[in-house]
């Protein structure tokens, strides 16, 4: 089973990249972690699309999704929803194919320094991703990243217990 993972961030120090990497490390499968900085795109606009078509980088990202069996996404939150870089990629992918998630099993995680742990962006994604072809398998928000995640792991016992349940539930569904 091939896992593809990425964070919805262009921060070189993305906490969601660190977190989604930790989540995928719980699975002993063949896994590829992409960085959105390697998929730099123009801001989506209908006029740009009419004049230039869909950028090659969008097709590259779409092909990476095609080759995966399971997709893990670390959702970074800006102002209660997707970051601009992720929403832009999302818009471009939806122009390539509305159901760009192609029926893949998708696991969503989010974290933030604050107490809601990316709950706003998670709620947006839980409603929207199935419309784009995701089979949602599980989701997890980790609040207060800086306190709860240290030296590459969850150090707060209540969050760790919730996380272990989440991982067990995902494992039961993806084998
Ligand atoms: C423009 C901006 C808006 C933000 N809005 C939120 C927010 O609504 N909720 C939140 O919990 N954190 C918010 N933050 C803090 C981010 O969660 C924090 O920067 C986090 O590191 C972003 O994830 P990343 O490191 O994976 O890019 C915001 C940060 C920025 C720069």
Image (cartoon, rainbow, N blue to C red):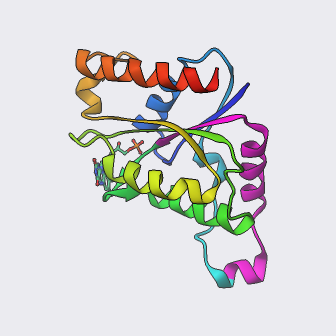
Residue 33 picture location, percent across and down:
62, 33
Of 156 and 8, the residue lying toward us: 156
Q: Out of 135 and 46, give the one closest to the viewer.
A: 135
Q: Quadrant of residue 83?
A: bottom left
Q: Do we see residue 175 in this rendering?
A: yes
**Nearest to the observer: residue 156 or residue 41:** 156
Judge whether 158 appears above or below 83 on screen: above
**Residue 13 visible, this angle:** no
Left or right relative to 55: residue 80: left
The number of callouts visible is 0
Magenta segment boundaries in residue numbering: 48-74
Q: Is 130 on the left-hand or right-hand side of 83? A: right
Give the camera-side residue of 52 and 122: 122
Q: Residue at x 56, y 63 (%)?
A: 88
Residue 146: x and y in percent read: 27, 29
Locate the N terminus and report the quarter of the image it occupies: top right
Instruction: Say whether residue 34 is magenta.
Output: no
Q: Percent from the top left, x then y, of residue 73?
A: 53, 40
Q: Residue at x 57, y 54 (%)?
A: 130
Q: Position of residue 123 (x, y in %)?
A: 38, 52
Which residue shows up at 48% across the image and 24% down it? 169
Q: Residue at x 48, y 18 (%)?
A: 168
On screen, residue 18 above or below 95: above
Q: Quadrant of the C terminus?
A: top right
Q: Main secondary structure of the magenta part?
A: helix
Q: Magenta stretch: residue 53 in it?
A: yes
Name above or below for residue 103 compared with residue 51: above
């Amino acid at each position: 089973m091939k896992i593809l993972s990425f964070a919805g961030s262009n921060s070189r120090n993305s906490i969601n990249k660190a977190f989604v990497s930790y989540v995928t490390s719980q699975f002993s499968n063949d896994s590829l972690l992409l960085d959105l900085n390697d998929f730099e795109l123009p801001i989506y606009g209908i006029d740009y699309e009419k004049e230039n078509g869909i950028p090659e980088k969008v097709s590259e990202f779409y092909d990476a999704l095609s080759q995966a069996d399971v997709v893990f996404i670390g959702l970074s939150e800006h102002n209660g929803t997707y970051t601009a870089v992720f929403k832009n990629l999302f818009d471009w992918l939806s122009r390539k194919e509305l159901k760009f998630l192609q029926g893949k099993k998708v696991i969503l995680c989010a974290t933030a320094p604050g107490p809601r742990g990316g709950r706003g962006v998670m709620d947006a994604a839980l409603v929207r991703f199935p419309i784009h072809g995701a089979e949602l398998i599980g989701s997890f928000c980790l609040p207060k990243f800086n306190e709860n995640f240290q030296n590459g792991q969850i150090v707060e016992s209540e969050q760790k217990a919730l996380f272990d349940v989440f991982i067990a539930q995902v494992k039961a569904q993806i084998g």
